[in-house]
Amino acid sequence: MNAVQEIHRFFPRRALPLLAGVFFFLCSPGSPAETVTQEETDFTAPFPVIARLGQVPDWSALDAYQGTITREEFTYLLNHCYARRPEDAADCIRIQTDRALILKQSNFPERGWYDLRFRTEDDLSTDGPRFWRRPTEIDDLPANSTKPLEGLRIAIDPGHIGGKWVTWDDRHFLLGKDTIPVKEGEMTLIVARLLERDLSLLGATVYLTRESNNPTTSERVETLQEEARAYLTRRGQIPSPGLIASTAKAMFAISSEIRSRGVILNESIRPDLALCLHFDASPWGGKPAFRSPNHLHLLINGCYSRGEIAEDDTRFEMTLRILQRIYYEELALSDVVSKTMQKETRLPAFHYDGKSGMSVNDNELVWARNLLANRVFSCPVLFFEPFCMNHRETHLRVQEGPYEGLREINGIYRKNIYQEYADGVTSGLIRYYRKKR
Ligand SMILES: [Zn+2]
């Protein structure tokens, strides 16, 4: 088993209720002897703080990254992109002269700190393990190549689910009599199919994380009831039937589904980059309604809140992204592709308020945000949020469907919305890889 596989081999967990709301934790028999001894004696340890359907991290999986990053670079990445504010990471990550100390279990410091030694000036520059490759690590292109994506492995993740499953997903609505319903999970699959064809023609090997409207996870809302109840109890919430129902629903359609795609992507596809396709929507309150303006943005992973960094698995996954230096590739790609997306779609930039999303450079189209997919897909992730689905023009274009050629939309001849989306992505990737290879 190599180190990257090791990272994804999290310990299964067995929780036993002791007193009301008190749990203790046992490791699997395969875990390091030192950890087992420590944990078996920790009868007072609370159940760890873990994200929805996350697993207790195996910190020893970071051993392969010892001495691979300097103090300056680790601190820069943590404070510039990953922690929302430097103080948000301070409780759980302590930067020392020659190492970072990372708290293993945020609600039980007795578990100890993971000791990550920095690379010093004298050390040779080395990378820790990763499956994805930078453009410079892929074969050079002949100058006149018609296949600028030759040799590249691309995973396309069509966001959400479709068909009969949309009712679990909350990313669909009907607006107006006799209209076609807007279903994000079906629209992203249409764009994914166009990209699969177009990027393959340009030489890339393309994989989809889902090939149909169906979920990839084998879990269902019914199978997640107990997990939802336990999660709410651990978070100090009263597990009312309504809250269990809404938590199980989110666990199925979001957490379980995205984690399942993460396993497919990290263990089977192992791509050089992932394209997460979404359409945006503006909040509409109780009843679906049109909202202005229409807009566009791309997301890179970052902007972790104090509460998110306090989740042991989330903190581990964030650290892994820092150690693999994913930021540089993710930002450079997003920077180029956001501009070709804007040229194709003619959409203005969407702006965050600095809380859930923050800016990391002078590109107003690119924002850092911590989402499950762009955190657990262990490679550079381009996360697209073009078009506000409940904007009048987007709604009109969805009604027009995937027509051939051009049609007049509000006085301008345009491609169908799906092809326009795909062309914005494709031209950005061509521009980026032609320049970098
Ligand atoms: Zn979405």
Image (cartoon, helix red, strand yellow):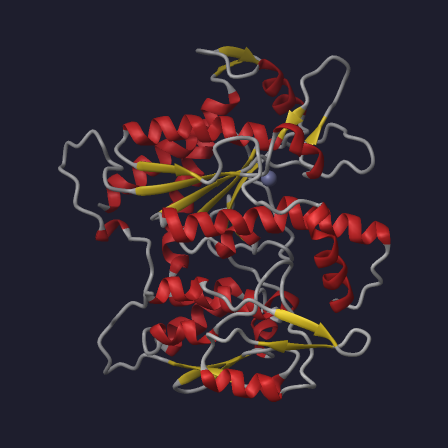
- Residue situated in front as seen by the camera: 120 or 66: 66
Give how far across and how far down residue 296 sits, in percent.
Answer: 55, 37
Q: Quadrant of residue 326?
A: bottom left
Q: Residue shown at 77%/59% (left/top)?
A: 229
Give how far across and how far down residue 128 sits, in percent.
Answer: 32, 68
208 to the left or right of 131: right
The image shows residue 340, relative to residue 402, as above or below, that is below
- Residue situated in front as seen by the camera: 337 or 232: 232
186 to the left or right of 140: right
Give how far across and how far down residue 146 sits, in percent.
Answer: 20, 29
286 to the left or right of 413: right
Residue furthest front in the image: 29
* Quarter of the image with the C terminus in it: top left
The image shows residue 363, relative to residue 323, as above or below, that is above
Q: Is residue 358 among the parts visible in the rendering?
A: yes
Q: Is residue 423 among the parts visible in the rendering?
A: no
- Residue situated in front as seen by the camera: 23 or 117: 23
Q: Residue shown at 61%/31% (left/top)?
A: 162
Q: Residue shown at 52%/59% (left/top)?
A: 302
- Residue situated in front as seen by the camera: 331 or 59: 59
The image shows residue 256, relative to residue 231, as above or below, that is above
Quarter of the render that holds ligand 1: top right
* Quarter of the image with the N terminus in it: bottom left
Give how far across and how far down residue 124 sits, in percent.
Answer: 22, 76
Q: Residue shown at 63%/18% (left/top)?
A: 396
